[in-house]
């Protein structure tokens, strides 16, 4: 379609609400899981998306893939708007955008062999002759580090790392342009996490695909990403180079996240957030983070900060204090809206 | 009857056993399952070769030998299982009845499963209004006593074999529909089906290749439960005079007419009753075993 200079993925102001109902006769209320998220991703680039559970990371991943339609906003893939989920245009696009799941055992069909499942995208999109498909499956299995004899095995007779390799192989078999990884390593053993991360980095370097890496593991995101975006309550609060963001976080929420990374032998002061993560059904006014923010000011309670580049270094951050628009007098966080 | 068919049954049985042993080569088949398979193969062989092996025509009357005793009660070899009140050979009638009842039970079970699973998948796929409509049908079907429905249909449309089989097929469809819908929705929400959908698979592939095999074990068990029920239902309806009409005969029909002679000539009723019981038991045993065997997640 368009040339390689255009963004591979351009998501603009995505919003998605779910209706929930409390109690038998309770009124159903809308929960804005994702609220105005914009993302850009170029070919060969990895964007890390971090945040605590329930902040809308996985919903963003599904919106980006078009599995769910956004309530507001547009997703453009390679310059063209995303077709509706379930249409044939959408199905055809699947060969160019694939997903790696958190729990590989759930994502695989227990009744089919690994080889059959890796070949499935080729069968679905009618790519190649049966002999070519077999070759391609063998090649992609070797690429992700599976032995040829694994092809005849069922998922439950493989180890966790091997299953995730199989899921990755299935995602890569059509040579996609975009790979969305939704917490791909959080269900794995620590020893295997590093192997899978390295595998993903190698594969991306070789194929030059764009990758959206969703995780709550800051160190994994830092290792794999070219850019990192921090999400809080359905919004991106900070975005920038991973080293810069994680060394010198500008947003108070990122500061708290970064200070929670354990460092052996280092007793740096840890920012401990007050209160629970707020309920997305009952969003605080102004900056969503202000009830837990150690530096919140009166402005933060009333005005929602925009995500915009900071004057000093151009880091994109959504915080009145970081932009110097509000005095950063250290005030105790109020808990009234929790 | 065993004399005439045992050779074909054993060869068929060993073939079947070899075929089935491919599902689980590690441990041997339990002896009960071997017996169940042999019995069902025997029933199938009888049903297929009914015209060749029955010693008399099932309507042929031998008025001089009415209510003659079976061999094991001291009767003559001319009528191995005795004769009924009209002098018709019980063995010949039993053979014809087995064919009729198996046809009805297999046909109705398969019709019920196909209709139920299809509607269940339709409900799970489209959700919304279509799902509500299917669920309303399911509740409607579960709420009406089947016998009343059967009476109404047979009274209005008359009785033919095809209609009768289709009618019995509607007996348990709502069970399959509920199972198929529930399992398909839970599979679609998270896990393999969502992953296959994201791969770009068509609904046909998703439901046919992934969801159906994954829920097949539950459906097979449900079918093996429905199969004996349908045999019994057919017996009940035939007994009421709504099912298979004389001169045609079925197992239930034989039991129904034999009831009048229960005290004086029990063999008329006991032979078909025995076949009904053993066949239903064998299908249940085999279904339970197949479920375990066909499921690679059970080791």
Image (spheres, rainbow, N blue to C red):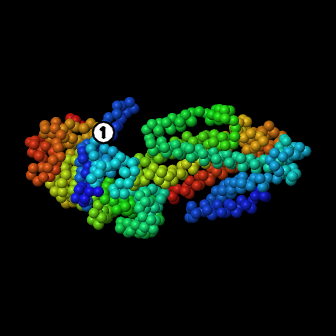
Which quadrant, please, contains the N terminus of chain A? Answer: bottom left
Q: In the displayed image of the protein, which residue is found farthest to the top?
A: A25
Answer with left or right where residue A141 lies relative to residue B236: left
Q: Which image quadrant for residue A268?
A: bottom left
Q: Residue B91 at what x, y percent from top left?
A: 79, 50
Residue A141 on image: x %, y %: 39, 66
Quarter of the image with the C terminus of chain A in it? top left
Q: Residue drawn at (22%, 54%), measured in percent from left and top?
A: A228
Residues A233 and B121: in front is B121
Q: Is mark 1 on a helix, strand or loop?
A: strand
> Can you name the residue that lies furthest to the front here?
A1
Residue nearer the viewer, A122 or A184: A122
Query: Residue B254's image quarter?
Result: top right
Q: Residue at x 66, y 46 (%)?
A: B105
Q: Name the residue under label 1.
A: A31
Asked whether the viewer can see residue A155, the reply is no
- Can see residue A88? yes
């Amino acid at each position: 379609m368009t040339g390689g200079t255009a963004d591979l993925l351009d998501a603009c102001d995505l919003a998605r609400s779910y209706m929930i109902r409390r109690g038998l006769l309770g009124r159903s209320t809308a929960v804005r899981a994702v609220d105005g998220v914009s993302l850009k991703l170029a070919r060969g680039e990895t964007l890390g998306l971090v945040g605590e559970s329930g902040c809308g990371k996985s919903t963003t991943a599904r919106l980006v893939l078009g599995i769910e339609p956004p309530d507001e906003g547009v997703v453009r893939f390679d310059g063209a708007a995303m077709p509706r989920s379930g249409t044939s245009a959408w199905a055809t696009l699947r060969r160019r955008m694939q997903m790696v799941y958190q729990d590989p055992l759930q994502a695989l069909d227990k009744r089919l062999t690994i080889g059959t499942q890796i070949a499935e995208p080729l069968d679905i999109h009618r790519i190649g002759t049966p002999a070519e498909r077999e070759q391609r499956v063998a090649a992609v299995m070797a690429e992700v580090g599976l032995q040829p004899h694994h092809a005849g095995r069922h998922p439950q007779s493989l180890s966790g790392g091997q299953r995730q390799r199989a899921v990755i192989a299935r995602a890569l078999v059509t040579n996609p342009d975009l790979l969305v990884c939704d917490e791909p390593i959080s269900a794995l053993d620590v020893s295997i996490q590093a192997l899978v991360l390295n595998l993903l980095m190698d594969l991306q370097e070789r194929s030059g695909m764009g990758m959206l890496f969703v995780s709550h593991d800051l160190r994994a995101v830092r290792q794999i990403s070219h850019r990192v975006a921090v999400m809080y309550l359905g919004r991106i609060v900070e975005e920038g180079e991973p080293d810069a963001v994680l060394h010198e976080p500008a947003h108070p929420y990122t500061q708290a996240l970064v200070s929670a990374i354990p460092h052996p032998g280092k007793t740096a002061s840890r920012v401990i957030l007050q209160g629970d993560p707020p309920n997305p059904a009952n969003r605080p006014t102004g900056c969503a983070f202000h009830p837990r923010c150690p530096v919140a000011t009166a402005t933060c309670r009333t005005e929602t900060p925009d995500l915009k580049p900071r004057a000093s270094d151009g880091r994109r951050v959504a915080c009145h204090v970081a932009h110097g628009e509000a005095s950063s007098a250290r005030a105790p966080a109020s808990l009234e809206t929790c | 009857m065993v004399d005439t068919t045992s050779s074909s049954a054993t060869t068929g049985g060993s073939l079947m056993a070899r075929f089935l042993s491919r599902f689980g080569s590690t441990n041997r088949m339990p002896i009960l399952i071997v017996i169940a398979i042999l019995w069902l193969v025997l029933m199938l062989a009888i049903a297929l070769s009914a015209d060749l092996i029955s010693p008399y025509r099932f309507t042929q009357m031998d008025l001089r030998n009415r209510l003659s005793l079976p061999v094991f009660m001291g009767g003559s070899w001319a009528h191995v299982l005795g004769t009924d009140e009209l002098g018709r050979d019980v063995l010949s009638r039993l053979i014809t009845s087995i064919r009729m009842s198996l046809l009805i039970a297999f046909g109705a079970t398969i019709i019920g499963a196909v209709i139920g699973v299809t509607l269940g998948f339709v409900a799970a796929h489209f959700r919304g209004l279509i799902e509500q409509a299917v669920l309303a049908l399911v509740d409607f079907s579960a709420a009406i006593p089947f016998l009343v429905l059967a009476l109404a249909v047979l009274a209005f449309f008359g009785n033919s074999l095809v209609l009768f089989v289709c009618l019995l097929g509607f007996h348990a469809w709502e069970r399959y529909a509920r199972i198929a819908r529930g399992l398909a929705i839970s599979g679609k929400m998270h896990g393999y089906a969502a992953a296959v959908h994201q791969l770009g698979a068509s609904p046909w592939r998703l439901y046919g290749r992934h969801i159906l095999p994954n829920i097949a074990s539950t459906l097979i068990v449900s079918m093996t439960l429905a199969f004996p029920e349908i045999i019994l239902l057919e017996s009940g309806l035939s007994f009421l005079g709504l099912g298979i009409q004389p001169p045609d005969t079925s197992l239930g029909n034989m039991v129904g007419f034999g009831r009048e002679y229960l005290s004086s000539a029990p063999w008329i009723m006991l032979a078909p009753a025995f076949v009904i019981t053993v066949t239903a038991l064998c299908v249940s045993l085999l279904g339970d075993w197949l479920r375990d065997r066909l499921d690679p997640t059970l080791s």
